[in-house]
Image (spheres, helix red, strand yellow):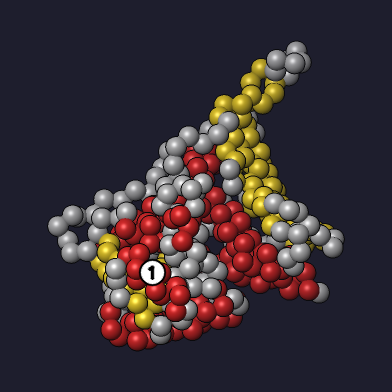
Amino acid sequence: MSTVSLRTPSNLPALSVLVIGLGRIAWLLEDDPKREKPASHVGALLNTAGLTLLAGCDPVLERRKAFAERFKVPVWQDAKTAMVQSKPDIVCIAADSDAHYQLLLTCLEFPLKLIICEKPLTPQFSSAKKIVRLAQKKAVQILVNHERRYSDDYRAVKDLIDSARYGSLLALHARLYFGRTRAVDSMLWHDGCHLFDIIRFLLADQDISYQLARQSCHSMLASAVVNNCLVSVEAGKGRDHLHFELDLSFERGRARVGNGIFELSASTESAFYSQYRSLSEETKTWQGPTGYFSHMMEDALACGREPGRVPISSATTELATLKVLHRLCKLLAA
């Protein structure tokens, strides 16, 4: 199975990181007893030799106080002041997505080795395009935190596809249910971006042109064909739970992967019907950590060390995903 663990020279000076946005994904998720650790940007960078936490920034006083007390680093209210005063090598933007565009514009005024940004890159496709063009002009790489690209369970499924262990991939069905009342277009942009991004990753980052198959007051179904593989995505509301799943059907097997889900089944001689074959479970659950946040931060370190290195989850791959979402949202509104 492929992994993304990276080795960097230990004798090099550590790269300093300024964290902008000091809430849940920045560091508070480290206190969730059920989550695999590290579970946040700060947790991952503190766990990565070669990176050091330099400072924090947040407009909310209570967040700044809590962060400074926990990590004993300086904090600022204003992003530009924080950039001028701290002079970081890397900036990690973990603020609300509505603030991403202006924060990215501010950060791109300064010489940086890398920007790490939470998903989605910006709240609109048009502003995302502007940021990608500006970052290319400034020669600054942006790593967008689609952590499933770095997660060993999803990468194991990608290896199944690439190695053809179960033969050709014939169909992929993805599901996202999140909440009772959230509008489907909002869910697509803020949570569905993870789903559509990981589909692109599994299918070698090919461009996918989805058609809106149908929609109801609760759900929508979109579909496409990629290299003779039927791809369908269902997203909806009206549920009291989160469900994130990809179900992949191969010539000689099946894989299911998602939040709390990892199952592999292979075609074998049927135990139920003579002269037939059936699926037999090979793996029921993922064993051990997936390294989803750790591997992402290792990629960030490697990009900071190697000028020109493109992140596994880059601004370019993010833009392609947001283009898909932009088109689907327009179809839903029509």
Q: In this rendered view, identify the residue nearer to me: 121 or 136.
A: 121
Where is residue 248? Give x, y as percent: 64, 41
Q: Residue at x 39, y 45 (%)?
A: 3
Query: Which residue in the structure is indicated by mark 1?
Result: 67
Q: Quadrant of residue 333?
A: bottom right
> 179 left or right of 10?
right
Q: Can you say which quadrant of the picture contains the C terminus?
A: bottom right
Q: In this rendered view, identify the residue nearer to me: 28 or 37.
A: 28
Q: Residue at x 28, y 84 (%)?
A: 85
Q: Residue at x 64, y 24 (%)?
A: 280
Q: Residue at x 73, y 73 (%)?
A: 330
Amino acid type at circle 1 is: Phe
Q: Can residue 162 be spotted in the picture?
A: no
User: From the viewer's perspective, is residue 99 above or below residue 268?
Assistant: below
> 163 left or right of 178?
left
Q: In this rendered view, identify the residue nearer to me: 3 or 101.
A: 101
Q: Quadrant of residue 82?
A: bottom left
Q: Can you say which quadrant of the picture contains the N terminus?
A: top left
User: From the viewer's perspective, is residue 258 above or below residue 325?
Assistant: above
Q: Can residue 85 be spotted in the picture?
A: yes
User: From the viewer's perspective, is residue 283 above or below residue 316?
Assistant: above
Where is residue 279? Give x, y as percent: 67, 26
| Residue, far left | 11
